[in-house]
Image (tube, helix red, strand yellow):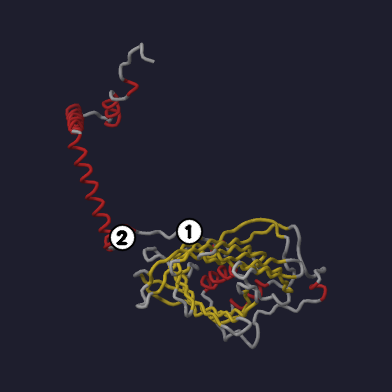
Amino acid sequence: MYEALTFRENLIISRLEQNGAPTAVGGICVNVEMVRGEQPLERRMEDFELKLMRILDADGEADHMVGGSMLERPRLSEEDETGGANGGIADGITYNKLLVHVASQFDVDGVNAGSNITSWVDRNMHTVEELRREFVNDVNYNEKSLYMGLKKKWYYVKHTSSMETLDERKLYSLRKAKNYISEGANIILLRYLAFTKYFGRFELACAYINGDLCRNIYDCFGAESAMVNDCRLDVYRVKRTIIEECGLEHVCVSVLTLQGQLIKQEWEDCDYVMHVNPHARLTNEKPPGNQELLLKDYWLEDMQMLSAYLDQQNICLMKNKSYMIDHPELQEIISDYVNEILMLRPNNILEFTLNYFGIFDEANLPRNDYIR
């Protein structure tokens, strides 16, 4: 299962114009891969993964959201809180983990902006570490960052902002962050939801860029058919609602293939959207890593690309004709070569050609013994 969720994908970031047409302004790369390494920190309680999968495997029964958070883990005992025999951390064990890296850059009103996410996620969807950066390179370089790392008794949180000259640090107990899922783990979760075609609603928690924990609600609409790049394809749609402590809501809609490849993602009341390359070939099979662009099927329909090709073709023809006129001996050499082949009809044309033009090799030319 995990191997099926590990692949790389590249998307275009576009700005939506007033008429709704997208204009490409940047790009984003998302990469998820399996890694091995030391696991210094792992919670030893009922696995978050088991609680999550139990709900996701419910096959679209009635909404699992009843009142508060739905994926509540068992209440920790005092021994669990302090890392005793039945809780805390397992040290020095090597596990397979998932490394998530996201990098984007795009133009915002003539200003370069972007973000980076690097996450280390274990097989139970716990985030061991995550570092997020968001930047705008205006007159001054402004950057916000958030680091969250799993410690023995808590999550360590560090938030910095160059614009506000801010450096905040705080701790979240494992009880408070029991349903926390990072942005890197969210990418893996979206792929899993699409892969399993889950239908329903559930709630977790996530962290805003300032380090505050927020409600994180997923509304999953299951598989449906849609036209993608002029092809009929089965897709999966998820609406994610992030609610800050102050009550402010952020809504994001993601559309994926049934193998978890992101087709489109947009935020409510935002002029920017992420989408797959319009010339990419999409299927319900696992992506090879980079979208294959079938230019041989599309370039004749693209007037700009066709015009550029014809212009370049004419330029090359003119250069070749000009060179032939400036070097008439070339025509004579080619004519002699073709005549020799037709007259002698050698069995091995390649060997004959090497010998024929070998006389022009500098090493085979006669040399004056007095020249060194």
Q: Mark 1 points at which residue?
A: 289
Q: Decide: few, some or many residues near mark 1? Use Cα within 10 Å; few <14, some 14-19, many ≥20.
A: few
Gap between marks 2 and 1 measured at Cα: 21 Å
Query: Which residue appears farthest toward the top when viewing the image?
Result: 370
The correct choice, above or below, for 60 with respect to 332 in the image is below
The correct choice, above or below, for 329 with respect to 15 in the image is above
Q: Mark 2 points at which residue?
A: 297
Image coordinates for residue 292, horizontal then vertical, percent:
40, 59
Q: In which quarter of the image is residue 62?
A: bottom right
SS type, badge 1: loop
- Residue under the point 61% across and 78% down: 55
Earlier residue among tags 2 and 1: 1
Quadrant including the N terminus: bottom right
* Amino acid on which disc 1 is placed: Gly
Q: In which quarter of the image is residue 348?
A: top left
Q: Which mark is residue 184?
A: none
Q: Decide: few, some or many residues near mark 2? Use Cα within 10 Å; few <14, some 14-19, many ≥20.
A: few
* Amino acid on which disc 2 is placed: Asp
Count of marks, rendered view: 2
In depth, the one of 163 and 220 nearer the eye is 163
SS type, badge 2: helix
Tell me whether circle 2 and circle 1 mark residues in contact (CB < 8 Å).
no
Task: Determine whether, in the image, residue 51 is placed left or right of residue 334.
Answer: right
Image coordinates for residue 177, horizontal then vertical, percent:
69, 75
Image coordinates for residue 86, horizontal then vertical, percent:
80, 70
Query: Which residue appears farthest toward the front when viewing the image?
Result: 139
Task: Determine whether, in the image, residue 344 is placed left or right of residue 171.
Answer: left
In depth, the one of 98 and 102 nearer the eye is 102
Image coordinates for residue 20, horizontal then vertical, percent:
37, 77
In depth, the one of 231 and 321 nearer the eye is 321
The correct choice, above or below, for 14 with respect to 202 in the image is above
Q: Evaluate whether residue 84 shows in this view.
A: yes
